[in-house]
């Protein structure tokens, strides 16, 4: 209708995204329907059905099913643990609060070490136990009823979200991510081919864009494991790692016009295809066009992953270590656990000293926002969005309870007054200023406005309850500022420390635990995330060009380390060369990779290798020195004056 189109145009001029607004309003209506169903079944806390719908909103059908499933699993685990704590505590407030703080810390630690919605389910089980107990007023006789009430309301909300996704014509995320992966593969093959054919055309910025895109796509893959797609997403992830390894190997190769032309042709061909037909066979044929071992291994790994994507029945697979083992941030997980424990402990202490049940609001609010923000790349920035959403929710809740509920005090009147509060979610979701705050708005507004089954009577001041709820997130924000501040820079540094530790262990250990091919694959997976986080920083702490150059230097040094470890096993080396090799490995094992001492050691080694007739090995060390020099020069050029 014309007048509807005109209304949407007005909203677009105000900065609202029309497609997001339509979807947001649809989700709000589905949430209201779930709320009405739970309320009609006379469940004690029907608002959690609506909150579940809001929180499971995802771009694709598979993601909604996946998140709904894991939300239900996490709710069951957390609710049952909360019931067990209430039964064990027998009304002992101090014991139950301490047990909840400890449980949330453990679940936050475990969730920080996981990926995809398994992490979400683990975090949710942590604060579900808190919700069950604080909503129960610490009565062990009825805690099981509250636990099953929460499980049923979440199940109603999850089913409503899944049914809406099924009948709303939402797109399939697997098809879209497959298309993105194929386009990225075509771009990478073309860029790798151009780097081989014309080394003078190599641009570090283009290299960084491809790495950042690969890291972003890997994050998206972690949310696409529903409907049996796990094996498919794993093969795409293997392909992305192999593409990164191939790009590194091509940048390390001085020049190879024949192979470069082949890769460019394959990239152009893949861009025009709808699948990977013939790509694995063509990559295997390209092996004969290079004598570079690293390049051959990268081509082999890429052909294996593409063959698996073309034929899911193929048993060919990459030999990979434990999934994501090389990315686990144990230190960050421990810091996140300690942070949430201290925040919840302080709120619990305030509850014990004041004996006021009002502290249930900051306890639930802080438990949810701190747990979920812990796994984010930039938690403090996320907490700002959380606070904006909760402030908006507190304002809406106060206005509803002060202005509307006294006019419509009946249970049905309370329910109908929630319609405007729910629809506001759609508008917040559609505006760029508040889009990331919409989920937190939905949590707090329905936490504060729980429709009952008796006429409305005011228990606590609406302003006081809203202030307490927002206060929990403010305390969480201060915790991220004071306790182990974390952002993309810190996460990037943590991965660099892991990479450095692995290289040092390889250089100094008595026996090699991994092959050079395994190390390259591990580094490629890590570096994708580093490049993605560097793009998020947008050059605030380190220029992306420096990050990319550090990656090239690291790969060159790894090749040198494995080459030297191989030479140590060779008989007939002169004592002077043996000492030079040992000195270089020792320097790599204890120093920063850009120190002058390392450069001096490598220069001495290159001379000894050349004098011993080991020309190829000397050239490899020379390329490493060249990369180190480029990195040091780039750092001087980009350093703040």
Image (cartoon, rainbow, N blue to C red):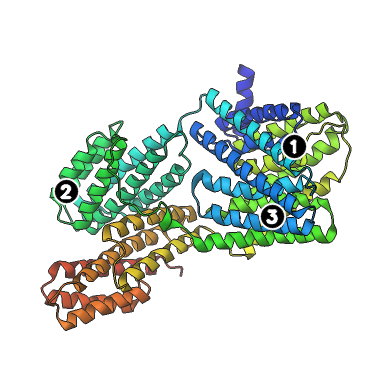
What is the number of the mark on residue 100? Answer: 3
Q: Where is residue 388 in the image (x, y as percent from the top left)?
A: 67, 47
Task: Of the two numbered discs 2 and 3 on the same chain, state the one appearing first in sequence.
Answer: 3
User: To which quarter of the image does residue 275 belong?
Assistant: top left
Judged from the image, the secondary structure of the residue bearing numbered disc 2 is: helix
Q: Mark 3: which secondary structure?
A: helix
Q: Which residue is pictured at 63% across the width and 44% down the height? A: 437
Q: Can residue 439 be seen in this view?
A: yes
Query: Badge 2 is on which residue?
Result: 287
- In front: 215, or 630? 215
Residue at 30%, 39% in the rendered image: 308
Q: Judge by depth and name the residue closer to the eye, 556 or 287.
A: 287
**Which numbered circle lies on residue 45?**
1
The CA span between labels 2 and 1 is 64 Å
Q: Where is residue 119 in the image (x, y as percent from the top left)?
A: 54, 48
Whether 32 is drawn above or below 81: the answer is above
Q: Which of marks 2 and 1 is nearer the N terminus?
A: 1
């Amino acid at each position: 209708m014309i007048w509807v189109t005109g209304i949407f145009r007005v909203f677009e001029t105000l900065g609202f995204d029309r497609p997001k607004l339509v979807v947001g309003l649809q989700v709000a209506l589905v949430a209201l329907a779930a709320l009405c169903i739970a309320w009609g079944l006379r469940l004690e806390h029907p608002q959690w059905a609506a909150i579940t719908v809001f929180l499971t909103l995802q771009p694709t059908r598979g993601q909604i099913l996946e998140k709904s499933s894991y939300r239900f699993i996490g709710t069951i685990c957390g609710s049952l643990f909360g019931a067990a704590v209430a039964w064990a505590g027998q009304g002992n407030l101090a014991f139950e609060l301490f047990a909840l703080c400890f449980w949330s810390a453990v679940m936050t630690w475990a969730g920080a070490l996981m990926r995809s919605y398994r992490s979400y389910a683990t975090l949710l089980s942590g604060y579900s136990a808190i919700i069950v107990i604080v909503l129960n007023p610490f009565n062990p006789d009825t805690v099981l009823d509250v636990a099953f009430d929460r499980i049923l309301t979440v199940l109603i909300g999850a089913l409503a979200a899944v049914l809406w996704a099924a009948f709303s014509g939402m797109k399939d995320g697997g098809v879209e991510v497959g298309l993105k992966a194929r386009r990225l593969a075509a771009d990478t093959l073309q860029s790798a081919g151009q780097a081989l054919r014309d080394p003078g055309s190599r641009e570090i910025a283009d290299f960084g864009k491809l790495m950042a895109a690969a890291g972003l796509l890997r994050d998206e893959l972690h949310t696409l494991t529903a409907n049996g797609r796990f094996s498919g997403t794993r093969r795409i992830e293997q392909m992305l790692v192999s593409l990164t390894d191939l790009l590194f190997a091509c940048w390390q190769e001085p020049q190879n016009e024949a192979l470069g032309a082949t890769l460019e042709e394959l990239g152009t061909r893949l861009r025009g295809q709808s699948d990977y037909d013939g790509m694995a066979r063509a990559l295997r044929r390209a092996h004969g066009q290079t004598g570079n071992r690293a390049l051959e291994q990268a081509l082999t790994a890429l052909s294996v992953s593409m063959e698996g994507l073309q034929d899911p029945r193929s048993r060919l697979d990459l030999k990979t270590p434990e999934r994501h083992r090389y990315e686990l941030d144990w230190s960050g997980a421990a810091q996140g656990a300690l942070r949430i424990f201290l925040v919840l402990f302080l709120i619990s202490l305030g509850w014990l000293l004041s004996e006021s049940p009002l502290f249930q609001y900051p306890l639930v609010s802080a438990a949810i926002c701190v747990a979920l923000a812990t796994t984010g790349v930039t938690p403090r920035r996320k907490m700002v969005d959380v606070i904006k959403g909760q402030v908006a929710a507190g304002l809406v809740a106060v206005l509803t309870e002060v202005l509307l509920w006294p006019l419509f005090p009946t249970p049905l009147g309370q329910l109908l007054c929630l319609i405007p509060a729910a629809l506001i979610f759609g508008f917040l979701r559609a505006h760029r200023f508040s889009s990331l705050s919409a989920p937190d708005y939905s949590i707090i507004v329905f936490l504060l406005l729980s429709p009952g089954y008796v006429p409305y009577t005011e228990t606590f001041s609406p302003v006081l309850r809203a202030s307490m709820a927002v206060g929990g997130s403010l305390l969480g924000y201060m915790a991220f500022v004071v306790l182990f501040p974390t952002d993309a820079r810190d996460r990037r540094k943590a991965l660099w420390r892991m990479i450095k530790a692995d290289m040092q262990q390889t250089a100094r250990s008595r026996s090699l635990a991994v092959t050079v091919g395994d190390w390259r694959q591990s580094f490629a997976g890590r570096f994708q995330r580093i490049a993605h986080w560097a793009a998020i920083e947008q050059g605030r702490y380190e220029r992306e060009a420096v990050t990319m150059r550090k990656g090239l230097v690291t790969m060159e040094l790894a090749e040198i380390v494995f080459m030297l470890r191989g030479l140590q096993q060779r008989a007939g080396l002169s004592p002077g060369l043996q000492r030079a090799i040992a000195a270089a490995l020792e320097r790599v094992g204890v120093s920063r990779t850009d120190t002058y001492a390392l450069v001096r050691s490598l220069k001495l080694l290159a001379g000894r290798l050349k004098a011993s007739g080991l020309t190829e090995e000397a050239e490899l060390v020379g390329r490493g020195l060249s990369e180190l020099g480029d990195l040091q020069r780039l750092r001087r050029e980009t350093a703040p004056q």
